[in-house]
Amino acid sequence: MDYDSMTVLKLKTLCKERGLRVSGNKSEVIIRLMENDEVGLAPAPTPIQHQAFPQHNPGGYIPPQMIYVKKESELATGIGICIMIYAVFRLFWAVIFSIGGLGGVGWILSPVAFILGIGFMIGGAVTYSGYRNGINLTLGVLIVSGILSVIFHGDEVNPVSIAWGDSMFLTSIMCSISCMIIVALPLLMSPTLKSGWPEAIEKILGSSSGSDTKRKVTCNSCQAELQVPANYSGQIECPTCQAIMSV
C-alpha cells in the first residue's frame, strides 16, 4: 500500500482502525503502519507434531486382558445378609441351651442346633458373595431344620424348634416354608448368580486347582481377548472399551 501518497489525516484514520497509536508526524505514522503490515503478513507458527512410534507388536498379537467382574444381584446380597442374621439367632439359641442346660432333650439337641446355625452362616455368606450354591446350601439346611422342628415339636422348648405347643405347630411349618420361598427368590430373579464356591471354600474342599484355570472370551464390542475364571458365569466388563456382556 502506497502510504506516501496519503494525507496525514488518512494515515491516522488507518491507525485508528487498526487500533494503533495515532500521534506523531507523517513519517512516524507510516512506519507504524508498515510495521503493522509486516506483523499481519507473517505466517502463523506451525505447531510441532510429535510422531507416534508404534509399539513393537509382531503379528498384530493382542495380549489377553483381565476383566472386571460386575457386582452380582443386590437381591442375593440382601438375602445373604438376612440369612446370616438368622444364623446368629440360631447359634445364640443353641448356646443358651448348651450353657443353661434347659431341659434334657434341649441339652442333647444343642450340638445339632449349633451345626444348623453354622450351616445357615456359611450359606448366608456364600449367598452374599453371589454364588448359587449358597442358596442351595441354605435351602438344604432349612429342610433339615424344618424336619427336626416337626419331629421334636412339643410342649417342651428345645433348640431345634423355635415354636412349641400345639397352637404353634402350624406356625412353625409355615415359617419354614416361607423362609424357603424367600431364600429361593434369587434363583428365580437373578440369572447372573455364579456357579461353584468361593475360593476359600474350594480350597477346603480340595478343588482349588479348578478355580485357578482361566478361559478366553472375546469382547463383543472391541474384539479384545479377555480371560475369565473357567467356572465363572455372569456379567463382565471389558477393561478396554468398558462394554458389559454376559459369559
Image: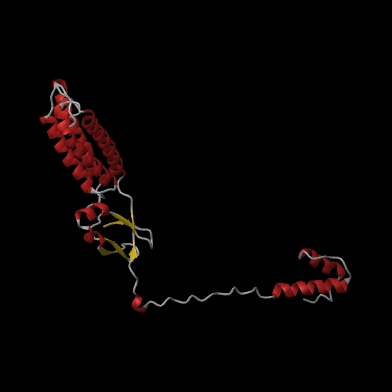
Q: Quadrant of residue 139?
A: top left
Looking at the image, residue 59 lies above or below residue 139 = below
* x then y, percent, for residue 167: 15, 20
Looking at the image, residue 22 lies above or below residue 181 = below
Q: Is residue 189 left or right of residue 44?
A: left
Q: Please give the name of the residue rendered at 24% of the width and 59% of the height, measured from the top-left corner.
A: 211
Q: Residue furthest left?
A: 151
Q: Please give the name of the residue rendered at 17% of the width and 40% of the height, measured from the top-left corner.
A: 141
Image quadrant holding the N terminus, namely: bottom right
What is the basis of the colouring in this image?
A: secondary structure
Q: Quadrant of residue 144?
A: top left
* x then y, percent, for residue 10: 83, 68
* x then y, percent, for residue 135: 21, 44
Q: Is residue 156 left or right of residue 69?
A: left
Looking at the image, residue 6 lies above or below residue 71 = below
Q: How many marks?
A: 0
The residue closer to the viewer here, 17 or 193, is: 193
Q: Is residue 9 left or right of residue 207?
A: right
Q: Please give the name of the residue rendered at 26% of the width and 54% of the height, measured from the top-left corner.
A: 199
Q: Quadrant of residue 219?
A: bottom left
Image quadrant holding the C terminus, namely: bottom left
* x then y, percent, for residue 180: 19, 37
The residue closer to the viewer here, 200 or 188, is: 200
